[in-house]
Amino acid sequence: FLFSLVHYIGTYGDAFTLASFTFRFLFGLALNVLFIVRGFGIAAWTHALYDVMVFTVFS
């Protein structure tokens, strides 16, 4: 919950929408499960690769 809200704070924060908050919350839960099952490295790389995909494919 808290990490989902961090994306909306500050000058560079996104505009709050329920859809983006819900997506980030659910993706955070999935990363937490991945962290518990596989460890920090896999969860961190998954997040990093998602960021690269967003900045290259969807921009």
Image: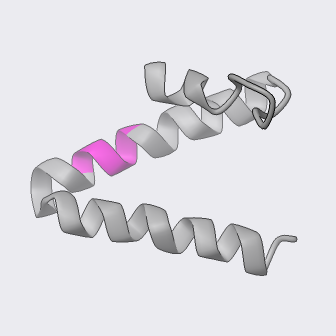
- Counting from the top left corner in percent of width and height, residue 35 is at 20, 52
**Does any portion of residue 1 appear in the rendered image?**
no
Name the one closer to the observer, 42 or 26: 42
Question: How many discs appear?
Answer: 0
Instruction: Answer with the quarter of the image where residue 51 lies.
Output: bottom right
Instruction: Answer with the quarter of the image where residue 20 lies.
Output: top right
Residue at the extreme bottom: 56
Residue drawn at (58%, 38%) of the image: 24
**Which scheme is used to colour this image of the protein?**
one colour
Q: What range of the chain is rendered magenta?
A: 29-33
**Does any portion of residue 11 appear in the rendered image?**
yes
- Counting from the top left corner in percent of width and height, residue 14 is at 80, 34
Horizontal side of 16 relative to 50 (left or right) equals: right
Name the one closer to the observer, 42 or 30: 42
Horizontal side of 27 relative to 37 (left or right) equals: right
Residue 58 is one of the magenta-drawn residues = no
Secondary structure mostly seen in the magenta stretch:
helix
Horizontal side of 20 relative to 43 (left or right) equals: right
Residue at the extreme front: 11
In the rendered view, would you say 50 is above or below 6?
A: below
- Counting from the top left corner in percent of width and height, residue 10 is at 73, 24
- Counting from the top left corner in percent of width and height, residue 8 is at 71, 26
Horizontal side of 36 relative to 55 (left or right) equals: left
Residue drawn at (47%, 68%) of the image: 48
Name the one closer to the observer, 13 or 59: 13
In the rendered view, would you say 29 is above or below 59?
A: above
Residue drawn at (76%, 80%) of the image: 56
